[in-house]
Amino acid sequence: MSRTFYFSGGEVGSFRVVDTLSLRGESLPSVSHLDVTSSAPTTAPTFCLWGVTSNDRYVTTAEKTELVSRQIPLGRPNTTHGAFIPIKKNAEWWALPQDARRRIFEEDSRHIALGMRALPAVSRRLHHCRDLGVDAPFDFLTWFDFEPQDVQVFDDLLGALRASKEWDYVEREVELRVERA
Ligand code: HEM
């Protein structure tokens, strides 16, 4: 199975873009559709961001066990709503050693504990861009889907994460809200 996923913004795609929010730093060009594919687009979209799924960096064995028991893969029949959120962290974050980053990520910010509360309502996939060998505009591409009735669960999680210490290190963040076309 491919570990590479492409997020193409343009005039066609499996998702309609219903809202674009520029939270920090430069936004993305405004588009009406988003396509998510595991092979490179054959036409030229307005933008194409790509990343790879990877090994975990921060989770402990106990956290991993709980995540695996609660999370459900993307693409359930009724998860018509979604969000694509590319994120770039600053140089200060990347200069920190692994243990300091873990401390900020979980002990200070409770990213995993907060995220766990949104499971299984929200499904997710994290893509990494830092080690692609190209100068990528974002470090992470985050991708979520959920049912319309769970929009609030997702919004509450976003609010809590953005108020956390981890987000002090975010220098670019754009949010595309989508619905299945
Ligand atoms: C739906 C519930 C969520 C859960 C259960 C969850 C869980 C996790 C876990 C376990 C990791 C660490 C993986 C590792 O060990 O490397 C992670 C990383 C990450 N998550 Fe979440 N997350 C959730 C929602 C979100 C949301 C809503 C966002 C964006 C606003 C987000 C953005 C990120 C980013 C950017 C990383 C990478 C952090 C880094 O490596 O510096 N997550 N998440």
Image (spheres, helix red, strand yellow):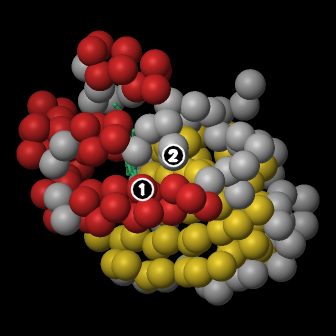
Kindly indicate whether the residue at mark 2 contacts the one at mark 1 (C-beta within 8 angstroms).
yes
Residue 21 % position (x, y): 48, 81
Q: Nearer the viewer, residue 98 or 70?
A: 70
Q: Which amino acid type corresponds to the residue marked 1 in the rendered image?
A: Val
**Residue 73 visible, this angle:** yes
Which residue is disc 2 drawn over?
A: 122
Q: Secondary structure at mark 2?
A: loop
Please identify the quarter of the rendering in which residue 98 is found.
top left
Q: Residue drawn 29% across and 13% down?
A: 61
Residue 66 % position (x, y): 36, 20
Spatial distance from mark 1 to mark 2, Cα to Cα? 8 Å
Specify whether 45 is left or right of 76: right
Q: Which amino acid type corresponds to the residue marked 2 in the rendered image?
A: Val
Q: Nearer the viewer, residue 41 or 13?
A: 13
Please identify the quarter of the rendering in which residue 105 is found.
top left
Residue 47 % position (x, y): 69, 72
Above or below 19: residue 15: above
Q: Residue drawn 72% across and 49% down?
A: 78
Mark 2 vs ligand 1: CB below 8 Å: yes
